[in-house]
Image (cartoon, rainbow, N blue to C red):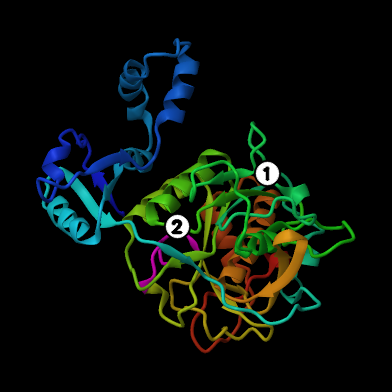
């Protein structure tokens, strides 16, 4: 099954499904990428309407409330996914959809990948935490009441070094699994748990490691292994709508993909709501301008540096990279209660997400762009072989 993402022009919607079929015998299934039901349900409750006739309430919602939505949010509500049986039919469908005057854009929903590399035996110290000057920063802020969404392979929310800092929704869920469409974001891979530990492993508990923001909360948003663009975009909106202040994304496209409207629309929505969006630059030893959404305006794009402030040889680079952070042999939490080290821009990005939480808790009135600026301009100057941002992050200076 192949998936395509389609955004209709304002005032248009997929009323006649049949006309979009590339051939008469191909069934085309349109469905909204972002569910509007939660918004309509809140609208019904606020208006004091009786639940039941959802269609009539939806019409009232569209008439009264939809015009008040931001342009970024309206774009999301005009976005649909199309499921096609095989690749050849999907290509035909894209060609036909691109020629339709009611459509703003169409693209294949491609699978994304994690940005980590294989690692060596366990390290004995957290050099990254020390390098970016966290101990001094903790005198001023530790990320209290800040929520960081980790879009990844899930999080081991039972890990003793993470359980005390896990976010929960009103129903007691630790987040959501968009990959398998349920509310159990348990990690069976390890990548997301490692990322979460770098961000907000519990401090002063006499065990294991400590995160950059040891009093922040982790919202587990599972997108892997089925991390197609539409899945990732829906997960970003979920994180925003459920109160995340920061979204960590240690993943990206499987190959060069300089423009990705599906994900860029979701990111623009997050930025419009004041959410800080962090992306790993990627591990291809390539120019990041070829990799969306890490190259997208407004995100904090993170390159990887080593203990001597050199660029890690795998790290993507270029003027689109915002800052560098430790990404070589990073010790953090592992599934089933353990600890391990990993390397990659996947490991660099959570240092920055944790720092963003510290800055937000210390400067609660600052907006997302100001947070980005504080992190960037207060970084330590380094001299890598290729550009990986204005400098390597310094937590204490950023506060």
| Horizontal side of residue 226 vs 127, given as left or right | left
**x, y percent for residue 299:** 48, 60
Task: Name the mark on residue 293.
Answer: none
Location of the C terminus (image quadrant): bottom right
Q: Secondary structure at mark 2?
A: loop
Q: Earlier in the sequence, mark 1 or mark 2?
A: 1
Indicate the quadrant where residue 365 lies: top right
Which residue in the structure is indicated by mark 2?
A: 227
Residue 265 lies within the magenta run: no
Q: Please provide percent x and percent y for residue 364.
A: 65, 46
Q: Which residues are magenta?
A: 290-300
State the SS at label 1: loop
The relative height of residue 45 versus residue 35 in the rendered view (above or below) is above
**Residue at the spot 46% in from the left edge and 29% down from the top edge:** 38
Q: Residue at x 67, y 86 (%)?
A: 308
Q: Which residue is mark 1?
A: 167
Q: Residue at x 31, y 54 (%)?
A: 1
Residue 352 location, quadrant: bottom right
Residue 231 locus on image (x, y percent): 42, 50
Which secondary structure class fits the magenta region best?
loop
Badge 1 vs badge 2, beta-carbon distance below 8 Å: no
Q: Nearer the viewer, mark 1 or mark 2?
A: 2
**Label 2 environment density (alpha carbons within 10 Å; few <14, some 14–19, many ≥20):** many
Residue drawn at the location 42% of the way across and 46% of the way down: 269
In this rendering, the answer to whether 391 lies above or below 166 is below
Nearer to the camera, 281 or 255? 255
| Residue 292 at x, y percent in the picture | 38, 65
For residue 294, say whether it is visible: no
Query: Residue pushed farthest bottom?
Result: 385
The picture quadrant where one finds residue 319 is bottom left
296 drawn magenta: yes
């Amino acid at each position: 099954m192949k998936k395509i993402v389609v955004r209709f022009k304002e005032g248009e919607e997929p009323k006649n499904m049949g006309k979009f079929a590339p051939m008469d015998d191909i069934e085309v299934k349109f469905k909204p990428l972002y569910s509007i039901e939660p918004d309509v349900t809140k609208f019904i409750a606020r208006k004091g309407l009786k639940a039941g006739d959802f269609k009539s309430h939806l019409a009232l919602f569209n008439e009264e409330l939809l015009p008040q939505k931001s342009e970024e949010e309206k774009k999301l509500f005009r976005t649909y996914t199309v499921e096609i049986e095989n690749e050849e039919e999907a290509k035909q469908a894209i060609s036909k959809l691109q020629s339709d005057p009611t459509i703003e854009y169409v693209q294949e929903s491609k699978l994304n990948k994690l940005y980590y590399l294989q690692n060596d035996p366990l390290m004995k110290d957290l050099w990254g935490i020390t390098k970016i000057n966290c101990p001094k920063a903790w005198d001023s802020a530790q990320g209290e009441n800040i929520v960081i969404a980790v879009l990844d392979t899930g999080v081991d929310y039972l890990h003793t070094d993470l359980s005390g800092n896990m976010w929960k929704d009103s129903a007691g869920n630790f987040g959501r699994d968009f990959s398998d469409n349920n509310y159990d974001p348990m990690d069976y891979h390890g990548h997301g748990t490692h990322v979460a530990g770098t961000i907000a492993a519990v401090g002063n508990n006499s065990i294991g490691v400590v995160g950059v923001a040891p009093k922040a909360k982790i919202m587990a948003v599972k997108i892997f292994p089925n991390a197609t663009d539409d899945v990732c975009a829906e997960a970003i909106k979920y994180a925003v709508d459920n109160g995340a202040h920061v979204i960590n994304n240690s993943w990206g496209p499987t190959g060069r993909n300089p423009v990705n409207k599906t994900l860029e629309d979701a990111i623009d929505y997050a930025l419009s709501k004041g959410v800080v969006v962090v992306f790993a630059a990627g591990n291809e030893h390539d120019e990041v301008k070829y990799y969306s959404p890490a190259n997208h305006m407004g995100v904090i794009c993170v390159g990887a540096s080593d203990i001597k402030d050199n660029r890690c040889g795998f790290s993507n680079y270029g003027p689109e990279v915002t800052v560098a952070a430790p990404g070589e042999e990073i010790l953090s939490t592992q599934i089933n209660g353990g600890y391990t080290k990993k390397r990659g821009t996947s490991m660099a990005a959570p240092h920055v997400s944790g720092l963003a939480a510290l800055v937000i808790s210390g400067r609660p009135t600052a907006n997302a762009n100001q947070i980005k600026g504080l992190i960037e301009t207060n970084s330590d100057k380094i001299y890598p072989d290729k550009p990986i941002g204005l400098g390597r992050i310094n937590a204490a200076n950023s506060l």
